[in-house]
Amino acid sequence: MFPIIAKELLAPTLARFSIQAPYVARKSQAGNFVIIRVEETGERIPLTVVETDLKAGTITLIVQAVGKTTNHLLTKMAGEALVDVVGPLGNPTPIEYHGSVACIGGGVGTAELLPIARALKSRGNAVYTVIGARSKDLIILEPEMAEFSDGMFITTDDGSYRRKGFVTDQLKDLLDAPIGIGAVYAIGPLPMMKAVAALTRKYGVKTIVSLNTIMVDGTGMCGGCRVTVDKQMKFACVDGPEFDAHTVDFDELIMRNRTYVDMEKAALHPCKEKTMELHEAMMYEIR
Amino acid sequence: MKYVNPKKPSERMRIPRQESSEQPAAERATNFTEVSQGLFEAAAMVEASRCLECAEPVCIEGCPVNIDIKSFIQLIFKEDYVGAVNKIRESNYLPAICGRVCPQESQCESVCTLGKKHPAVAIGKLERFVADYETKHNLFVPPRIEVRRDEKVAIVGSGPSGLTCAAELAKLGYNVTIFEALHAVGGVLRYGIPEFRLPRHILDLETERIKALGVTIETNFLIGRTATIDELFGEWGFSAIFLGTGAGTPTFMGIPGENLSGVYSANEFLTRVNLMGANKFPRYDTPIKIGREVAVIGGGNTAMDAVRTSKRLGAERAYLIYRRSREEMPAREEEIHHAEQEGIEFLLLTNPTRICADKNHWVEGIECQRMELGEPDESGRRKPVPLQGSEFVLPVQTVIEAIGQKPNPIIQSTTPGLSTSKRGTVVIKDGQQTSREGVFAGGDLTRGGATVILAMQDGKNAASEIHRYLSSKHNGGTTPHLIESVFSA
């Protein structure tokens, strides 16, 4: 069992967990993920390791309630435990010097971006961060990112906070500005990463994306995470999860990720209501 | 001696081979309960009495782990079933598993003297009978471990080779830890072999019996990532390591359409069901999609498991597409026979060339071409060659590729100095020794894709080699102490 040491609600559908997993904490680097199971009948889902605390032997996971498992996870409290956590999985991000880098986070993808952006900054890069979400309450980790970013930009689809528009609008401005962006790291929903790739291709700027695919074991065993990169079949779990955005077949992956949409919806319904009820009550208490 | 078989050999030869009862094909094709129900006690007694008790029992040589088959059958005849299962356990710690999944027809039973003119003694069914008897009557007692040794040995992977190696080393008194990447123990026995061939409770029981020897099992621990081989030797303090990580990486044919929704590797398909319980969705959270018509590509045991599973998940028509003929199929005869009984449709001498998509990027068919057998290839089997103009499209909504697996590369790529072949297998010398001192390997990781029992043979050999290695390394320096002294200390 992997005890939940702390839980902090960031928004009604978003929480930060600190999980006791000392072996994973010791070995995890920026870009790695873990596979977790919430309970014995649960499914295995990948989650990025956002931070580690070597002393406490804990890892930080940031979870947005999307499907049944993430909704269920959000009902868990400190003192409870996850049945399984395995990792660190995937290849760590190669942290190189590019001069200036743009780090683009969409929704909960911002959580995956945080350790990478921080490591890029430590490597001596000037880091320009763009966070985007549908609306203000889904913007996460703004203070954490702002702490080390040389430039901090936020966009919301509905204009409820800072710039109205998409992360690509802001990224275009950065690419046009005379700051010499040498590389772009983008993590978020697939359509966002696809749009970023299309934009940076025009500018000829190296772009890295982290792919969130269908996954079962996360160790190279099932092939469910296969994706076409540079016309070759790759497994996101062992060959990635990061790839050169300009060689990824996003359209194929977007279709593939829809495989279980109807079943996920059916499984989600009863669970989601429970999470929302619980969290609305909690948010009320916090306020 | 009591209960000596009074029958003359000629009389024994006249007794028909006893068959175990099976769930009727139509019924079992809709459930996940075990197909074969095993031998009843009376039938087992009769079957045991068929053994000719050869002076030189060739069956023992036919067994990859050299079980003393003659003796265990004699013990059955004496109604000493526990003695019989313990006799098996001297050579093979997993009798309930081997009695179910071993290809006896090409091993012990293929060389049985009785089998020259009559059906061979049903050695596998007898093995299963005594193992099940012991379980049913709760008679298992862990073997006594005479000495304890201080050295720690790490076993990587909890499949058949790892479990066997762990059991043998634990019996020798070593301090053994198994590291398993998944959340459940058993490797391919867990994620690959379906419940209707190997019930989960049997696997759980055998695992508990390994633990009863004092073996520690760490699940959720991926060697190469959570800790490396070098770290196991260093800070973890292990003196020897056995690698039994199998061949878990699926291979794909490389035909167009493989990334469509509805296309699975057999590994993914079987893992979803066997490990994750997708057949019990939504009670279990892992989903699986099964079409009305399903095509499984391949002719091995994995293909049989996948196609029979798809039938059980509700496929109306389940096809098995294989490019050679039935004779060349690598699957066990029993599995092919069971698949045929369950209504699986075999498309032999047929090779898929393309998977066809509907407008939603879902599978809607598979294009195949007919083949004919030409000259023998390097494997000695006649090579299938395409018949020009024979293409046709079979309407299916699910495609499962079961064309073979290769070893997972994580350990190889994180262990300096570990030699591998072009096929990705770990290279070993005699005695399961890899290119790294103190690191031994076996099973599918070195063979590239074989059987449970051959993996167990490797695990067993590796255990005695590790014992020899550690004994010589310390030049007899670590004196094994009597177990009593451990307790009194």
Image: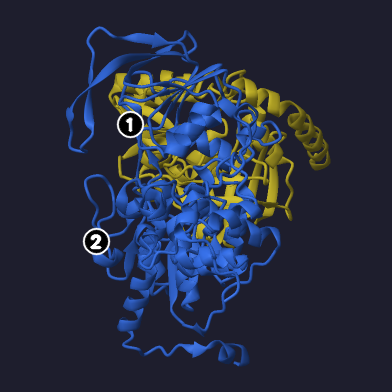
Q: What colour do you see for chain A?
A: yellow
* Chain under disc 1: B
Disc 2 marks a residue whose amino acid type is: Gly
Q: Residue B456: give x, y in percent of width and height.
A: 42, 58
In blue, which chain? B
Secondary structure, mark 2, is loop
Relative horizontal placement of residue B105, taking residue B419 as reference (left or right) = right
Residue A153 at least partly seen: no
Look at mark 2 in the image and give the residue it sits on.
B417
Disc 1 marks a residue whose amino acid type is: Glu
Q: Using the image as rendered, state which of residue A74 and residue B444 is in the foreground.
A: B444
Dot 1 or dot 2, earlier in sequence: 1
Relative horizontal placement of residue B445, taking residue B51 as reference (left or right) = left
* Chain under disc 2: B
Relative horizontal placement of residue B447, taking residue B344 as reference (left or right) = left
Residue B140 at least partly seen: yes
How crowded is the residue under tag 2: few (<14 C-alpha within 10 Å), some, or many (20+)?
Answer: few
Query: Residue A171, located in which quarter of the rendered image?
Result: top left
Q: Using the image as rendered, state which of residue B319 and residue A222 is in the foreground.
A: B319
Any mark on residue B27, and which? none
- Residue at 60% x, 27% y is B313
Secondary structure, mark 1, is helix
Any mark on residue B327, and which? 1
- Residue at 55% x, 42% y is B197
